[in-house]
Image (cartoon, rainbow, N blue to C red):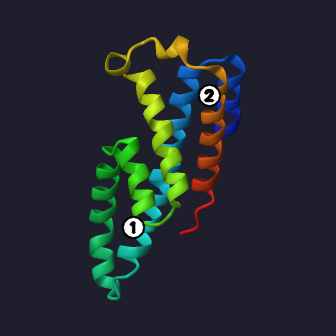
Amino acid sequence: MINPYGDIDKAIQARDWFNGFATAVSYIEYFGTIKIKRYLDLRILRAIDDSEERKRVRKQFKDDLGKNLERLSAKDIAFLLYAFQLVDSDTYLELRKIITERNKLVHPARKGIGWRYEKPERTAKKLLQQAKECIRKIQQISV
């Protein structure tokens, strides 16, 4: 069973910041992609009045959409959630902050591997708690 809150809480308890941020951003990508797909399906496919045309377009559209969304970065997903007005500006900025911190851990050559050991525990915990709240907001988006 998918449990983003439990998985992130386990990482916090273990003080495993690498796993915590990697897990949080994976869930942001997962749930964000689902909401973007639903939004686009609602706005594009369901907006086609002709049922025959809708049937012809549906399969190709879903294939193309799935392939293109798989290629998006976490930052792109956060941007699309905001651009489609699925999340507010505060949530968007929090998502960007969380993703940036994850990138410092996952891509240490860019920011230095020291982050894993130097990041204050309080700051890491706060960001991971914000990540849980962002995930909750994404899950609650109704489209």
Q: Quadrant of residue 100?
A: top left
Say above or below: 65 vs 8. below
The residue nearer to you, when weighing 18 against 142, is 18
Q: Is residue 88 left or right of residue 68?
A: right
Residue drawn at (39%, 54%) of the image: 79
Looking at the image, which residue is at 30% across and 44% down?
A: 71
Do we see residue 2 in this rendering?
A: no
Disc 2: which residue: 123
Relative to 126, is 50 on the left or the right? Answer: left
Residue 4, x across and y down, in percent? 64, 38
Mark 1: give few (<14), some (14-19) or many (20+) Cα within 10 Å. Answer: some
Q: Which amino acid type is marked by label 2?
A: Thr
The type of residue carrying mark 1 is Leu
Q: Are marks 1 and 2 in contact (CB under 8 Å)?
A: no
Nearer the N terminus, badge 1 or badge 2?
1
Instruction: Let me know if residue 107 appears in the view.
Output: yes
Q: Is residue 44 left or right of residue 27?
A: left
For mark 1, give the secondary structure: helix
Q: Quadrant of residue 122?
A: top right
Q: Position of residue 135 (x, y in %)?
A: 60, 47
Vertical comparison of 75 with 17: above or below: below
Secondary structure under the numbered disc 2 in the rendered image = helix
Which one is nearer the viewer's eye here, 105 or 38?
Answer: 105
Q: Which mark is residue 53?
A: none
Which of pointers 1 and 2 indicates the residue nearer the eye?
2
Few, some or many residues within 10 Å of mark 2 (<14, 14–19, 20+): few
Q: Residue at x 61, y 55 (%)?
A: 137
What residue appears at the point 66 percent right and 29 percent down from the top-left corner? 125
Q: Which residue is mark 1?
A: 40
